[in-house]
Image: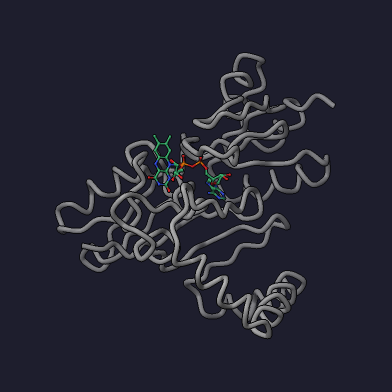
Amino acid sequence: MDLNKALENILPQNRIKGRLIDRYAFASDAGSYYMVPQVVVQPDTIEEIKSLFAFSSDNKIPMTFRAAGTSLCGQGVTDGMLVDLSRHWRHIVVEDGGFRLRVEPAVIGGHANLILKRFGRKIGPDPASINAAMMGGILSNNSSGMCCGVHHNSYHTVSAVKFVLPNGMVFSTENKEDYTRFQKEAKDISDGLLTLRNEILQNDDLIQKIRRKYRQKTLQDTVSTHSLIMKIHLIYSPIC
Ligand SMILES: Cc1cc2nc3c(=O)[nH]c(=O)nc-3n(C[C@H](O)[C@H](O)[C@H](O)COP(=O)(O)OP(=O)(O)OC[C@H]3O[C@@H](n4cnc5c(N)ncnc54)[C@H](O)[C@@H]3O)c2cc1C
C-alpha cells in the first residue's frame, strides 16, 4: 500500500510527512531509543484524529502520539505511524481568574505559566523541560518536577480531560452525562475498569502498595497512555 496516498483521504498532503528525511528526523525524541516511523502525520481536528484511529486499526499500523518529544523512556518513538501534535493544538484559555486553565495538548508548559503569571499563579507540574514540554505530554507522563513533588504533579492538578477513544468515541470528564454515556457506549472498557477496581478493593496489600507508590516520586513518572486516548482539552487547576 502507498501509505502517503492512502492518508491523503484523511489529511492534506502538507501534513503527511512520508519522505525519508522527515521519517529519520522524527526517529528519535530526547531519549536514547531510535525507531523510524513509517509516516509522520500532523492532524489538527478531532475528526482527523478519529479517521487516523480507524486507518490505524484497518491497516494494522500502530499509532503513537508525540507532543514536544522530550520523554526519556521511549514513549514517543514508533516504527508505525507517528502523530505529531506539536504544530497545532495550541489553544489556551484562562478561566476563573487564573484558577483554571483550558489547554490543548501542544501548549508548552512554560507558555501556560507565562499566561498565568499576570494572575500570580502557575501550573502544578514543573519538569525541568517545561520550556519545551507540552501539556499533552506533561499529563500523559504524569510529569512532576523538582518543586511540585507528588502533591502538585499532573494527575493531582488536572480538573478534566476530553479524550478520543481508538473507536472514535469522544468523552469529556467535565460533562456529568458523559459518565453514564461512557458506561453504556464504551461498556467493555467501563466494565473492565470496574472489574479491576473491584479486584484491587478486595486486596488490602495491593491497596497499600498503590497508595505507597503514588506518594513516591520516580525519575520519570511514566504512566503513559501511548495511543490509547487522545487528550484534547486539559483543564488545569493552577496553584500559587
Ligand atoms: C532535560 C530534561 C529534563 C526533564 N525533567 C523532567 C522533570 O523534572 N520531571 C518530569 O516529570 N519529567 C522530566 N523530563 C521528561 C519530559 O520532559 C517530561 O515528562 C515532559 O512532560 C514530556 O512532555 P512532552 O511534551 O515532551 O511529551 P512527549 O515526550 O512528546 O510525549 C510523552 C508521552 O505522552 C504521550 N502523548 C503526548 N500527547 C498526547 C496526547 N495528546 N494524547 C495521548 N498521549 C499523548 C506520548 O505518546 C508519550 O507517551 C525531562 C526531560 C528532559 C529532556
Residue visible at 50% across and 70% down in the picture: 212
| Residue at the front extreme, as displayed | 205
Percent x, y of residue 101? 32, 59
Q: Of 149 and 197, which appears nearest the observer? A: 149
Question: How was this image coloured?
Answer: one colour
Q: Which quadrant of the figure contains the C terminus?
A: bottom left
| Residue at the top extreme, as displayed | 21
Percent x, y of residue 175? 50, 75
Residue visible at 46% across and 47% down in the picture: 219
Above-or-below relation of 155 to 128: below
Q: In which quadrant of the rendered view does residue 169 lie?
A: bottom right
Residue visible at 65% across and 74% down in the picture: 182
Q: Which quadrant of the figure contains the N terminus?
A: top right
Q: Of 69 and 115, which appears nearest the observer? A: 69
Residue visible at 62% across and 48% down in the picture: 226
Above-or-below relation of 69 to 138: above
What number of labels is visible?
0
Percent x, y of residue 149? 34, 59
Above-or-below relation of 118 to 130: below
Percent x, y of residue 5? 75, 26
Question: Left of 229 or right of it: where is 191?
Answer: right
Q: Of 90 and 81, which appears nearest the observer? A: 81
Question: Left of 61 or right of it: where is 176?
Answer: left
| Residue at the bottom extreme, as displayed | 202
